[in-house]
Image: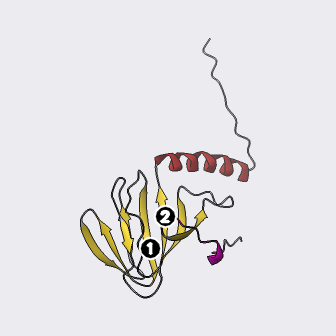
Amino acid sequence: MEVRRLDRDRLGPANNHSQRLMPWAALNAPFEGAWCVVKPGTATTRHAHHEYEIFIAVSGEAVLSSMGESSPFRPGDVVHFPPHTDHQVINEGDEDFEMYAVWWDVPMSHRFTARHQIEDSAARGHDMIFATRNEG
């Protein structure tokens, strides 16, 4: 078992304060992810991108803003943003708001599938064999 630990001293400026925990060499996953902290009285930059994305609220309270709508976002809540959907997290409170963000796209899924086939073959002790058919 390998545990990847959050290092609060390494929270970078992306999405207010965040640390990417995936990709992770020990984990073949079709997604990437980051721990995000939105400080009191601040907000993430409103943005949209080509990936699918979910946020999982962990602690504190925030407001989600997307496509002209707003909604409270509290621990245990999960939100999904389809590709090209603008979104922003706003912390109007007095405490840090913490969440985990996960995103994926089609190329990530293809890379996952290719790695999985190689890893699965190796785990079974088989070399990948490519056969050609003689069409004589």
SS at mark 1 in the image: strand
Identify which amino acid the numbered label 1 is placed on.
Ile
Q: Is residue 22 magenta?
A: no
Residue 125 x %, y %: 75, 49
Residue denoted by label 2: 102
Identify which amino acid the numbered label 2 is placed on.
Val
Q: Mark number for residue 46?
A: none
Outermost residue toward the front in this view = 41
Q: Residues within 10 Å of mark 2 (few under 14, many from 20)?
A: some
SS at mark 2 in the image: strand
The segment highlighted magenta reads 5-14
Q: Earlier in the sequence, mark 2 or mark 1?
A: 1
Residue 12 x %, y %: 58, 68
Residue denoted by label 1: 56
**Measuring 42% from the left and 61% from the top, which residue is drawn there?**
53
Q: Is residue 23 left or right of residue 98?
A: right
Q: Closest to the observer: 23 or 69?
A: 69
Residue 18 x %, y %: 54, 69
